[in-house]
Amino acid sequence: MPIQTSYLSEHIEGFEGQRVDLGITNVLSKVAQDGDIPFGRAVVQGTADGQCKLPTATGQFFLGITEMTTAWSENSSDLHVYEQYREVNYIDFGFVFVYTEQSVVPGDAVYFRHTAGASPLDVVGRFRKDADTNKADLVVGAKWASTTAAGAIGIIQLKAPGTGVLIAPDSSETLTGAGAISIDTGITYLDSTAGAMAMTLADGVEGQRKTIMMTVDGGDAVVTPANYANGTTITFNDALDTCELLFTGSNWYLISKSGADSGYITITATGAIPLARDIIFIDSTSGVQALTLADGFAGQIMDIKMLVDGGDSVITPANFLDGTIITFDDVGDSCRLIFDGTNWGVIGTATATVA
């Protein structure tokens, strides 16, 4: 009988739509609405709630990636696919093997093709890392998880778009130097023993919360979110400085803080009052000041006091419950404000004028 005398040094990576590992994977099902659907392809919401289909245009709701299965027999063309009107299994959370039209590396964005490309292999439902001008849509919350050449089988990590991040809320990481903060963990600890740190925070997925805490202070740790509704950066300069962020819409929002960016700042010129400070001292030695105050986060309290009077200081909050402006015209003028989620409101004044 025949005997195998040679072996492949490396096995094939996987097949389109195949699960990568035995980790947590979420599999759902709907009925194929229009025609057959191959494995490893993006599917979008069909006309009825219980239907799915291959993409046909931009802006359609991405459901997941069709799972490879041996449940069905080959169709009339001798292809193993999900046939029209049959139940389709698709994955919306986990690691999946797919065909990549471009070379990718871990962390690259994931786009699914809704319009065929120039190559015969650039077919609807396959994946890439950009929009191909206007022929592919972003998969929110997904990323490439392999280093793969164009035209090969790579790995996508899906995070259930529209349902939040499926991670344990107490999962954590510790950063000791500059770099990117993981959006796959609930808590990030900052240890700046080696000195000042500059970090970035990519967009999360809808409803995601993120806690960041400095555990060791060896220098300031500055976090720059890609899209931050409350400013540009968050600075941690003392051990136990902490903030909690919420990602919604297209921005991270600061929803609570303890120490992070807290403390005081003295303002000596016209400009915007930094939201990240709890106490604002006004020094108008150089003359009249016109100051603005953007919306804060719900429950935020801010104390403002004039230390040096070299001219009136007028603050105009973006949304103000009790008037339009607050005027400081004497040393010792002060007020305390609270943001209710929509407006700043005055909860105490000492001679500062509200009008």
Image (tube, rainbow, N blue to C red):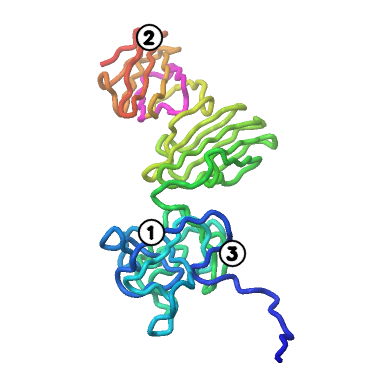
Label 1 to label 2, Cα distance in Å? Answer: 61 Å
The quarter of the rendered structure image containing the N terminus is bottom right
Asked if the residue under mark 3 is in contact with the one under mark 2, i.e. CB atoms within 8 Å, the reply is no
Whether 261 is drawn above or below 109: the answer is above
Which numbered dot is residue 147? 3
View extreme (right): residue: 5
Q: In which quadrant of the rendered view does residue 131 lie?
A: bottom left
Q: Which residues are magenta?
A: 272-295
Q: Mark 1 vs mark 2: give the one in front.
A: 1
- Nearer to me, 18 or 204: 18
* Residue that mark 1 sits on: 63
Mark 2, other Cα within 10 Å: few <14 / some 14–19 / many ≥20: some
Please name the amino acid that badge 3 sits on.
Thr
Counting residues from the start of the chain, the first of labels 2 and 3 encountered is 3
Label 1 to label 3, Cα distance in Å? Answer: 25 Å
Q: Secondary structure at mark 2?
A: loop
Whether the magenta-drawn stretch holds residue 285 is answered as yes
**Residue 4 location, x and y as percent?**
71, 85
